[in-house]
Image: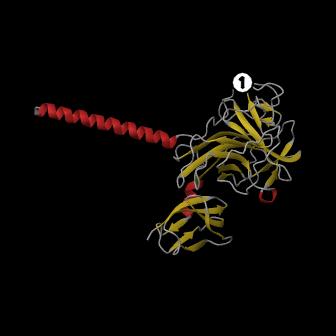
Amino acid sequence: MTLLNRNGEQRRMAAKLVLCCSLFFAQTTALLCQNLVPNPSFELIDSCPQYPALTGYQPGAIPENWYSTSNTPEYFNACIDTATGVPDNFFGHQFAFDGDAYSGMFSFWPGGYREMIGVELMTPLLVGQTYYASFYANAAYGGLQQTARACNNLGLLFCMTANYWDIGLQGPEFGLRNYAHVLSTSVITDTANWVLVSGSFVADSAYLFMVVGNHFNDANTTVDSLGPGYPWAYQFVDQFCVSLDPLGCPLVNGIDEEYVGQVVVFPNPARNSVRIDWKGSRVEHLRVVDLMGRLIWQEKVVGLQGATLDVSDWVRGGYILILEGGVRRSFKLVLVE
């Protein structure tokens, strides 16, 4: 082979390498940015809902991939002009945030009644990985169904099982955990505009399902009045996102960055002890779970600004530290010899 041919062959090999690397990084970026929620804005449905299957997520009025996990939520679509139409419907007046459809549910009803919807993610979450999640919500008001309250805690809880709720069998309901991975700690009172709810968390299990609703009981839910009417809160929801990449989902500006800046975990990796400081942030409870999601340690820290965790006799390896309170935050903790 001549020098010219050899140099040409090297250039061709280099070009192939660059192409392969470009394809690899493109595929990796696409995977990281992928939204793991199928049919995220409820646009896909077999056919436009027809009477009598209009309310309650009944057969014929359920968007593809979604289902009820508690009681009778609603599906709204502009293809119909009825009690579940868009923008005008039984609960109020609201255009979809994206496309022509959205869902809605009672997020507060005195006595613990809640409506929730669920979806199976495209792939299970990876234990120890940080995920970013978001959705849009709006307080329903002004419809024939005179819901007159707004509440906080509307959020996302990830779980291992589907928990389908059948309208004919009437249950079982998903149940209230007083916990969610991502939620709105503020009361959503905006009846005109869609409000972005977002956050991040470290997966402590290979979760495959996501449940949307208010997962908190009456005592742990804050309720505000929107005006005259019944003491119920009903909220519309649209455009869900779960991604490995912070750029993959819309996030509320400043919330995650502010909280990260106020929480310090050191040293990490650690040997004998770990110091956690959260000056300026409201933290009420600390938990540590292993990478299988099993509880290792927990402690209430209401009123404190920090804590020191003795890990000298813990098994070396990876754990997940979870801070709960005004904002929920998770950190991967590594113990070394």
**Residue in the foreground of this view, choosing between 223 and 8:** 8
Residue in the image at 51% along x and 42% along y? 33
Quadrant of the snapshot with the N terminus = top left
Query: Which quarter of the image is occupied by the C terminus?
Result: bottom left
Q: In the image as oriented, which residue stretches furthest toward the left?
A: 2
Q: Taking 1 as reference, is 220 left or right?
A: right
- Residue visible at 20% across and 33% down in the picture: 9
Spot the residue most to the right. 229
Location of mark 1 (residue): 47
Quarter-of-image position of residue 26: top left
Given the current orientation, which residue lies at the most extreme front position?
Answer: 169
**Observer-nearest of 247 and 58:** 58
Residue 217 versus residue 265 in the image, above or below:
above
Q: Nearer the viewer, residue 33 or 236?
A: 33
| Label 1 residue SS | loop
Relative horizontal placement of residue 123, taking residue 301 as reference (left or right)? left
Residue 90 lies in what quarter of the image? Answer: top right
Q: Is residue 12 above or below residue 233?
A: above
